[in-house]
Image (cartoon, rainbow, N blue to C red):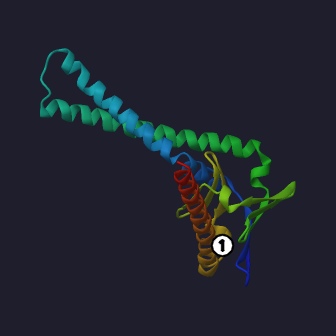
């Protein structure tokens, strides 16, 4: 459920389900996923070519093609296994951590994101949001390398709420990034003046 008022504040009530948590893990591990596929593809390519090189054969088109086929097969296998592993691990964590499936209330405003749960509340300033990712299933506001606030799109009931939440997040993250960039530029200017 979402509530918005005229002060550019938005309240989103979120109760994650297993699919939301699995999707969040896929988003969190996406970069690692691509690195693994690349590594296994290159490893497969090396395995495909190595026996022929060891025998002293020249690297011809058919040999390179053989290596590429083995590399693609190993990359596809790694992709499948990693995807299955993410799902199994996420399922285990979600079932063991009952806090994940409890209701969270996110209040998005100009100061940050106020998070309320049955065990307490706190404010996460916009400066602590390191990355924002949006995909077909939701919004992911990263507060660390492996932590994110998840707002499933199903919690946003219509296009107006969806656009309002995107606007609030983008405006505040851009504002903080601009302030940080201006602060960094001012620091650099002061350091240059000291020399």
Q: Residue furthest bottom?
A: 6
Q: Residue furthest right?
A: 119
Figure disc tally? 1
Query: Crowding at label 1, few (<14), some or many (≥20) Cα neighbours within 10 Å?
Result: many
| Residue 51 in view (yes/no) | yes
Between 3 and 193, the residue placed more toward the observer is 193
Q: Is residue 179 left or right of residue 119?
A: left
Between 136 and 128, the residue placed more toward the observer is 128
For mark 1, what is the residue?
156
Q: Is residue 193 above or below residue 10?
A: above
Q: Is residue 47 left or right of residue 130?
A: left
**Image quarter of the N terminus:** bottom right
Q: Which residue: 57% across, 65% down?
A: 178
Q: Which residue: 12% across, 23% down?
A: 58
**Residue 122 sits in quarter:** bottom right
- Percent position of residue 154, x then y: 64, 68
Label 1: which secondary element = loop
Q: Which residue: 63% across, 77% down?
A: 164
**Residue 149 sits in quarter:** bottom right
- Percent position of residue 104, x then y: 77, 61
| Residue 138 in view (yes/no) | no
Q: Which residue: 48% across, 37% down?
A: 81
**Residue 151 sits in quarter:** bottom right
- Percent position of residue 21, x then y: 65, 52
């Amino acid at each position: 459920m979402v509530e918005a008022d005229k002060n550019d504040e938005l309240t989103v009530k979120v109760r994650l389900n297993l699919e939301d948590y699995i999707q969040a893990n896929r988003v969190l591990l996406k970069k690692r996923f691509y690195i693994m596929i690349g590594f296994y593809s290159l490893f497969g390519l090396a395995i495909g070519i190595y026996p022929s090189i060891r025998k002293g054969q020249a690297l011809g088109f058919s040999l390179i093609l053989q290596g590429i086929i083995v590399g693609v097969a190993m990359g596809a296998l790694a992709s499948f296994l990693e995807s299955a592993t993410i799902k199994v691990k996420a399922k285990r964590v979600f079932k063991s951590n009952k806090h994940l499936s409890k209701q969270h209330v996110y209040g998005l405003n100009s100061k940050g994101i106020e998070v309320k749960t049955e065990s307490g509340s706190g404010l996460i300033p916009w400066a602590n949001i390191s990355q924002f990712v949006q995909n077909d299933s939701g919004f992911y506001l990263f507060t660390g390398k492996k932590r994110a606030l998840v707002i499933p799109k199903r919690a946003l009931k219509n296009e107006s709420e969806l656009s309002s939440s995107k606007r609030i997040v983008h405006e505040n993250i851009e504002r903080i990034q601009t302030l940080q960039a201006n602060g960094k530029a001012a620091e650099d200017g002061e350091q240059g003046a000291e020399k």
